[in-house]
Amino acid sequence: MVETTQPVSMDEGVLTLSGGGVLVMVDARQGERPRIIYCGPELAGADPEQLKALAAWQYVDGSAGQERALTLSNELSTGTLAPAGLLASRNGEDWAIDLRVESVRSLEGPGVEIHCLDARTEVGANYTLLLDQSAGVLTSRTRITNHGDKELTVDWCAALCLPLDFRLSEIMGFSGRWAGEFQREEIGAFQGSYVRENMAGRTSHECFPGLILKTPDTNEAHGLACGFHLAWSGNHRLRVDRLPDGRCALQMGELLWPGEIRLAVGESYGTPDLLATWSNQGVGAVSRAFHAHLSGEVLDTRTASKPRPVHFNTWEAVYFFHDQSTIIDLAKLAASVGAERFVLDDGWFGARRNDKAGLGDWWVSPDVYPRGLHPIVNKVRELGMEFGLWFEPEMVNPDSDLYRAHPDWVLDAPGVDTIAFRNQLTLNLSKPEVADYLYEKIAALVDEYKIDYIKWDMNRDCHHPGGGAQTGGRAVMHLQTLAVYRLIDRLRDAFPNLEIESCSSGGGRADYGILRRTDRIWTSDNNDARDRQQIQKGASYFFPLRVLGSHVGPKKCHITGRRFSMQFRVASAIFGHMGLELNLAHESETDRAVLAEGIALYKKHRALLHTGAFHRVPSAPHANVVGVVSPSRAEAMFSYALLESRPRTAPDRLFFAGLDEARQYRVRIVWPGVDPSINQPSIVQSCDLMRKGTVFSGAALMQFGMQTPPLHPDSALIYHLEEA
Ligand code: GLA
């Protein structure tokens, strides 16, 4: 353990933040360039002078004759070998900004703010560093201020430049696509740069702003690993640079459009937050730190103690074919299987009978619902469910009353053809009148119908974010992202119980920036239970189960055309925030009964699922094994999903994780409800797993493993473990 008893200390210009198993030391002597001495897992008795001595700069032939230390911004003045973390100038001048520490102050949080100034260029930088004492996640951000008398253009400002342990040679990046979010790409050791840039104007499906780094020997449970995430819902750049001299550095920040940030005298630009954590206990510990930080520090407390209700969402049940009696019949069926919240998706407003018209016209369609939504809302409440409504506030169809009245309310690049995208354009929310219009329309509906929940969608990339004449055509993507945040915050302030889901054609806007003001993400439009196993596993590196919307879809998946049993669809939806999105009238009575049993199982165990420590269990590619263990380690739930035919004659051995080696656990299979073994007798009978179960030690379950029964592919078992 670090001997510092204080979470933050300042001693002879060295700032130390420690807590949650993480230690950060910054050399912040007045008049010097600020630099990180150490950031990583806690170091027993760490002494900054020793660390500096151990990392002594060494002159070698052919290199600069002095050390070029990495600073918090790696400014160009440092002669940096790593890419600069700050690129700014005054019309081509003053680019050699040289930031020196002026003052340091401690913050509640706990954390520190380091105020730096370059007296020559008159550019200031404020670095904020906060360490979550319980989760061990560092939050950092930078604010650049123009103290000069001429405009300053900021082209790039990383939230922080972090040095990395060179042994972290393996990168896990996250790519994806619509209906295939959170795909992992693993890159082995390299020399040079790994760079990912996103210009989608939203967090994006293709480039999630998160990275995991590890050593070649690190696995889920052991070894050095670290994780980084940019809490931002707009454009971003992530980069890892492995330098010729053996050092390694990371930057994440907002990717700006040309000339987007021009600071007038006295103005500032603030970066999004970069979140970082380190562990010697493998990648699993990094994910658990992120989960704990999100739950403890980022998510609003309005849902902290409220069980995550089972959703019924109308989208895949009816799409745009709304009609009062159909919807009421669906609500009755939804309630009969156990749904607790009914969400009316796209198609209820304006002229929205398909995706070509109506966006922007946020009033209940008098053609479809002549009596308004009251008959539906009343029925939903009478059935004991909450009511949720779909909106896509930032968008407008050219075929809408809103666009006809205000064609100048959209983002564009004058003289350049718009890129077609789902027949819609993006409204310019940085104009106060646009944000006010949206606030008034949404708030009126929330008030009239006492809406409990909004599914907040955003279904196009933003290619040309010009702000129109008001900004001289300048790009306003930064302002737009902040304006979206402000609009949500305004609604949340006005309606303190209103919950919001962040959807963007599925998981296109899933990040900690949006989750600071929303309660759930729609993980993917793809409800294919097999694909979902992988998508949810990818999302689990950064997101806990309680925020991952996961729905039971129709028997034949609308996106992949594959068919899955109700048992498998339920098993895949239980490990998340469970919901349903299918036409229940088209399911057989038997399947509806299975679904009702699955929902009851979710309700019984959701407290464990949503507060337990999450574990990914390494498995062969044909399987997916994940589990949660209660904080006291007295209870656990694991899911074993077989996704392909098994390669060997015998089925897999399942190795549990996160249990207490010394305790005894009674193990039972709680899903599916009937013995799934395709050959009998199997371990299901020999250990009576469907009924009384059998008691085993935590050590045996984790290190010796448990035989699984023979299963068909596309089936899953859920195990429940309880201390005996
Ligand atoms: C997006 C969402 C879907 C659904 C449709 C409605 O694609 O991801 O869940 O709400 O919009 O148009």
Image (tube, helix red, strand yellow):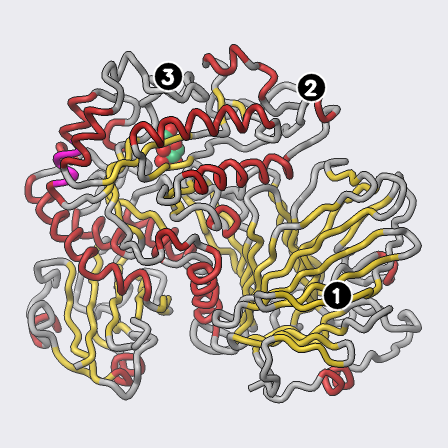
Image quarter of residue 463 = top right
Label 3, secondary structure: give it.
loop
What residue is pinned by disc 2?
414
- SS at mark 1 in the image: loop
Quadrant of ligand 1 in image: top left
Residue 228: x, y in percent? 57, 61
| Residue 44 in picture, x, y percent from top left | 59, 87
Say which of marks 3 and 2 sits in front. Answer: 3
Local secondary structure at mark 2: loop
Eye-nearest disc, 1 or 3 = 3
Residue on which the image places disc 3: 350
Crowding at dot 2, Cα within 10 Å, few <14 / some 14-19 / many 20+, comes out as few
User: Marks 3 and 2, how far apart in space?
Assistant: 29 Å
- Ligand 1 closer than 8 Å to label 2 CB: no
Is 331 in the magenta? yes
Q: Is residue 629 above or below residue 370?
A: below
Q: Nearer the viewer, residue 255 or 106?
A: 106
- The image quadrant where one finds the C terminus is bottom left
Q: Is residue 352 visible?
A: yes
Question: In the rendering, at what x and y percent does residue 459 appear?
Answer: 46, 32
Q: Which residues are magenta?
A: 330-335
Mark nearer the N terminus (3 vs 2): 3
- Tell me whether the residue at label 1 lies in contact with that at label 3, contact meaning CB atoms closer than 8 angstroms: no
- At label 2, the amino acid type is Pro
